[in-house]
Amino acid sequence: MKKNLKMQPTETAVFHAASRIYAAYIVSGQVGDQESDVWMNRAIAEAIKMADTTDQLVVSDDEIDGMGF
């Protein structure tokens, strides 16, 4: 079945990070045949956590402009 995905830029960024994390799990031999969904979900959760933490710790140019600086 063909799917049509339309991800927003932030979703795409999280996807790219998650795919790299997941690939690292695979290359390191952590992902078993029956565990791929578990490790994929873990990689996504970690990518989201990283994005959220980055957003909390870093003030972007757009956020500064909105503050009147």
Image (tube, helix red, strand yellow):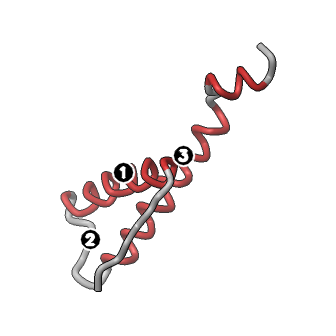
Dot 3: element: helix
The amino acid beneath tag 2 is Val
Q: Residue at x 19, y 58 (%)?
A: 27
Q: Which disc, if any, is residue 31?
A: 2
Query: Residue 32 location in percent, x, y?
Result: 24, 77
Upstream in sequence: badge 1 or badge 2: 1
Q: Residue furthest top?
A: 69
Residue placed furthest toward the right? 68
Q: Which mark is residue 51?
A: 3
Nearest the viewer among 19 and 6 is 6
Query: What label does residue 59 carry, if any?
Result: none
Number of the front mark, 1 or 3: 1
Residue at 37% over, 72% down = 4
The answer to which of 32 and 44 lies nearer the viewer is: 44
x and y percent of residue 58 in the render? 62, 29
Please report contact status of discs 1 and 3: CB closer than 8 Å, yes or no: no
Residue 67 screen position, x and y as percent: 80, 23
Instruction: Identify the residue shown where x is 34% and y is 54%.
Output: 21
> Residue 16 shows which numbered tag?
1
Query: The residue under label 1 is which amino acid type?
Result: His
Q: Position of residue 43 (x, y in %)?
A: 41, 61
- The kind of residue tagged 3 is Ala
Distance Cα–Cα, label 3 vs label 2: 23 Å
The quadrant of the image that shows the N terminus is bottom left
Residue at horizontal 40%, vertical 56%? 15
